[in-house]
Amino acid sequence: MSPIKVGLLGLGVVGSGTWNVLKRNADEIARRAGRRIEVAAIAVRDLEKARALVGDDVILTTDGMDVVRNPDIDIVVELVGGDTLAREWVMEAIAQGKHVVTANKALLAKHGNEIFAAAHERSIMVAFEAAVAGGIPIIKAIREGLSANRIQWLAGIINGTTNYILSEMRNRGVSFAEALADAQRLGYAEADPTFDIEGVDAAHKLSLLASLAFGIPVQFSKAHVEGITSLALEDMQHAQRLGYNIKLLGITRAREDGIELRVHPTLVPLQSMLANVQGAMNAVLVHGDAVGQTVYYGAGAGALPTASAVVADLVDVTRLQTAEPEHRVPYLAFQHNAMSDTPILPMDEVVSSYYLRLRVDDRPGVLADVARILAQASISIGSMFQEPAGEQADIIFLTHEAREGAINGAISQIQNLPFVQSAVTRLRVENL
């Protein structure tokens, strides 16, 4: 059969990795796909730099629309990031009748519903394995491997930058600022790391995983998002003393009244697999009613791991190109006309255990007043200890399960007590 012609949008870290994997493993990929896959055109910023990498046999342009509208292109691979130009190019590719592969989680988190609807209308495939957890095939696992299951919950470390920072804080005893600087020096963090350290990147990915797990539209705007910028080194140390490690987790859980969708720093038991994921690695736990708990672990970013996922999508699209549209695997695992309107729950309705740390004056009656406020809010204390700090002290509580709204109300009252000297630190505890 004639080769499948691919147009690349972007030749950065992932784009160049994709080019290299396609060239290096061309014969093996053709054996798997049933025909050769060749890059015919690439949109880039720097023509001279790109020509040095790809040679003279590929069309190069600085305009993505030239690639998208090229009649010889069968599949458009979007690797530029962002959600403005990328959206225009992907929507035009669909309008032109071309299948799409993308690694762009922000694009799909914000515009996925529109993109999937347009693709369905035109019987176009949209594949996005590389958009979540890099080289880990978590999309395929949920969409296909676990399709017999009612997914009950999933939780994961899906941002390598924040996991590297938290690992360094715990293992080396350095501050957040120092760990972030190291991450930037080593290339794990961008010059502007806001999306990573504020939890936005993880929330983009989690919103896609929730849609795959529960058959709901993509709803990034309803996710609860907290980052790691306010974490102090002493919280890492206190958590370890209590038998926990702190990780930035994306968690989504199906409940009778709706679906939890939340990203935040979380205390995880030291014996848990997630607690022991180090450095920039990613890991996702998925719990199905039939299979129980399954674990997916690997490199969540980088040129070759992410390119591995991009090329796997290209192979899938190539295999399925001749299949009838109704026989293809749905974009979000569930049939297009069978999506659920189950609501995303407000964060105040989430139930969890909590870690609370407050700096107080070291004098009699303090603990009694705080305990009274917690009791009035029906919040039960699981354990506590006190750390001296000169004329003040840090009091650390672990609570039993409580509703987030009750915790927030209690914290507001505690914060107004005259002997409380700093903002109350609140972290959630998940016994995964």
Image: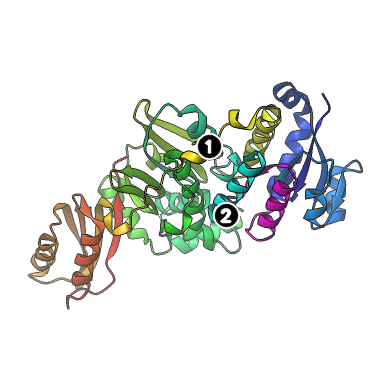
> Label 1 neighbourhood size at 10 Å, few (<14), some (14-19), many (20+)?
many
x, y percent for residue 114: 58, 52
Q: Quadrant of the C terminus?
A: top left
For residue 367, side relative to residue 240 (left or right): left
330 above or below 393? above
Residue 54 visible in image: yes
x, y percent for residue 250: 42, 48
Q: Assess whether residue 407 is covered by the magenta stretch.
A: no
Residue placed most toward the observer, 253 or 24? 253
Check disc 2 and give the amino acid type: His
Residue at 25% over, 54% down: 354
Residue 188 visible in image: no
For residue 300, side relative to residue 268 (left or right): right
* SS at badge 2: helix
User: Mark on residue 111?
Assistant: 2
Seen as rendered, the residue at the extreme bottom is: 418
Write down the residue under mark 1.
Answer: 139
x, y percent for residue 320: 67, 28
> Which region of the structure is painted magenta?
79-106
* SS at badge 1: helix
